Amino acid sequence: MAITVAELIAEPQLGLTLLAGSAGMDNRITWAHTSDLPRLWEWVTGGELMMTNGLSIPADADGQVALAEALMDSGASALAIGEKMHAPPLTHEFLEACNRLPLPLINIPYPLPFIAIARSVAESSLLEESRRLRQTARVYDLLRTAGASEDHWQSLVQRLASELDADLFVVDRRCLHPWHPEGQALPVFLAEEWAPLSGQVGLAGKNFQWHRIRGRHVLTMDIPTHANALLVVLPNSEPHPDAVVLLHAATVLGLQLSRIVLSLEGRHRLAGEFLLQAFDGRLGTADMESRLAAFEVPARDFVVASISADDGDRLANVHIELWRHGVASASLKRNNRLHMVVPADMPDDVLVHCAGADAVIGISGKADVTGIQRALQESLWALGSARANKLGLARYAEGPSWLGLTGFEEGAALVRRLLGPVFDYEQSQEGDLIVTLRTYLDSQRSWQKTASALFAHRQTIIYRIRKIGELTGLDMGETSTVAQLWFALQIHEAMHQ
């Protein structure tokens, strides 16, 4: 434990005396520093005993009071002045200010060298460092015995809290929800205080910051391995937990979170492999039911959610966000879209929160494993409807229609009627007609722009468009034909990506 002002003054070999500020005798001294510069407080980082031969002390009362207040604001533990050196007379106002703040004011007897005081503080700090090292070793040993399973998270947090004599909470700084599904929620007084500032907690960046909230000291510090994970510390006693040990505790929690996420990623890969086979119709009913059970998703009461977002990287973590909020899922990312099987009773607002504000979500009707392929088609249709109608979320067969159609059966029939002959031709001839048609329409029916985009000759593009007209029996020069083909392409691409 760092030496206090009272303990330093009590050392008989030093002969120090207290001149003022007796209410601050319990201040702990982390270091002793000598300076004779005029702006003495600029060299304070917090917890120091500042020693001066008197050249730093202003001669007037206002200057002396301002010095005391600046030292206190900077976090100095005490001020010590060398006797019979260069200090001006200490004014009554200065002594009163030291009592009021309180800032312990110490007299260093002549000719005691300042180094003797610094040595006493340093020797005390060595004992403190030994205690800190032992506690840090215990903190890391808790990680060794915690286990990699996500089930051990709260046990680790509670054991760290006991070691630090503080209440610990790990939350998401964006919403203040517990980061782990089994984690404890913030106390009500903190949630109420910070709710209006959600997403702005812990303004000290990657360091740590003490707050004074409703009469209690509260520390916020980032978990170093996870951008939005915030550690909140509520000390239960004085003195507060050592700052260095707290940094190590945050590192331990970050390492444990990384172990948990690594375990989740392994399960996520298995889920992706399963859904790829299920959506392609390569699994039987019994196999799908057992596999979904392994991911804790109900086999007879689920929905498929298809998600797209401008930030594709954001989709990579949606399964973790759902897990954090206690929602079981199995997911597959394919063609820049994320397809997820989740329980049918999952609230929409939870999915929106986990996917992010910029995501667009389409949700199928309720399904069981025998209808998982249809559910995928429904979710894609709902996604297309959401994007076309500029909605954040749409459910299949609910809300506005899409392209004047009510469901994917009508859409599939339209695609087959208009583009079926082209698909059949390409399957036998391995042509590029669909790609050419899409590019042609995206290029405002410009032969030259289409040829440049496809690195083909203009005459080749003309031939392919005429071939599409022959296969479909449509006049490619008619605006109505172009509109129908554009509709069909939109539906086809939405339902097959």
Image: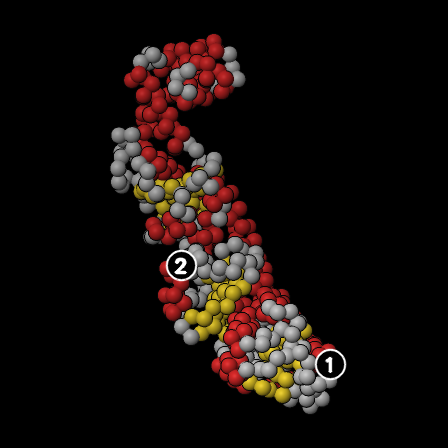
Q: From the viewer's side, name the closer residue of 108 and 93.
A: 93
Q: In this rendering, would 122 be left or right of 248?
A: right
Q: Up-down: is 344 above or below 254? A: above
Q: Residue at x 47, y 9 (%)?
A: 459
Pick the quarter of the image with the C terminus: top left
Q: Mark 1 highlights which residue?
A: 113
Q: Up-down: is 396 above or below 322? A: above
- Name the mark nearer the viewer: 1 or 2: 1
Q: From the viewer's side, name the closer residue of 435 and 161.
A: 161
Pick the quarter of the image with the N terminus: bottom right
Q: Measure how far apart labels 1 and 2 are at the Cα level.
A: 51 Å
- Please tell me which of labels 1 and 2 falls first in the chain: 1
Q: Secondary structure at mark 1?
A: loop
Q: Residue at x 44, y 10 (%)?
A: 463
Q: In this rendering, would 432 be left or right of 45?
A: left
Q: From the viewer's side, name the closer residue of 258 and 3.
A: 3
User: Can see residue 434?
Assistant: no
Q: Mark 2 highlights which residue?
A: 197
Q: From the viewer's side, name the closer residue of 50 and 380.
A: 50
Three-letter amino acid code at the position of disc 2 = Leu
Q: Quadrant of residue 120?
A: bottom right
